[in-house]
Image: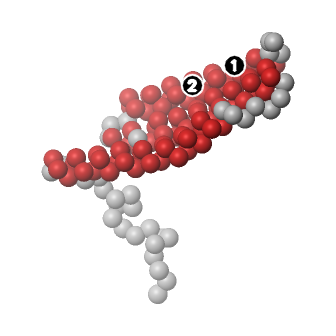
Amino acid sequence: MTLPFFGEVVVAVLLLVSGGLVLTAALGLWRLSDFFARMHAPALAGTLAAWLVTLASIVHFSLLEERLSLHVLVINALLAISAPVTTVLLARAALFRRRQAGDPLPPPLGGGEESPAERRPA
């Protein structure tokens, strides 16, 4: 069996966009200066790229088998479980190593001030 032409085009476009997102993540790793800033580029772009590859796989196998094929969603389920856990563990390990080395820690996100959402009405 072969895929119809429109199926090949859809799969190719999804895979090319996914590759472009991975390239963007790699450029983010190269351009960003701090470890904590570098954590975001591959996490965000890589997650979207993984979803696009999964969608391309669903289209490919569904057209090839002539029925809806959703077995590749298991891969994204595992990524959705493991990626946030891995990110938190990497961030904690980096903070621990900075504390051990005596380096200054990164400033709080709000610059040390309370955000409007954290302020309680008097």
Residue at screen point 33% across, 37% down: 33
N-terminal of the pair, mark 1 or mark 2, is 1
The colour mode here is secondary structure
Circle nearer the viewer, 1 or 2: 1
Between 81 and 84, which is closer to the camera in this rendering?
Answer: 81
In the displayed structure, does residue 74 sit left or right of residue 103? right
Residue 48 shows in this picture:
no
Residue 23: x and y in percent read 50, 25
State the residue position of label 1: 12
Between 11 and 1, which is closer to the camera in this rendering?
Answer: 1
Residue 68: x and y in percent read 80, 32
Q: Residues within 10 Å of mark 1 (few under 14, many from 20)?
A: some
Residue 32, compared with residue 95, is above or below; it is above
Residue at screen point 33% across, 64% down: 112
Q: Residues within 10 Å of mark 2 (few under 14, many from 20)?
A: some
Amino acid found under the numbered disc labelled 2 = Gly
Residue 107, compared with residue 68, is above or below; it is below
Using the rendered view, name the quadrant where residue 77 is placed. Answer: top right
Which image quadrant: the N terminus?
Answer: top right
Residue at screen point 49% across, 83% down: 121
State the residue position of label 2: 20
Between 33 and 39, which is closer to the camera in this rendering?
Answer: 39
Residue 6: x and y in percent read 82, 19
How much space separates mark 1 and mark 2, taking CA atoms? 12 Å
Residue 96 shows in this picture:
yes
Amino acid found under the numbered disc labelled 1 = Ala
Element type where label 2 sits in the image? helix
Residue at screen point 40% across, 50% down: 88
Residue 12: x and y in percent read 69, 19
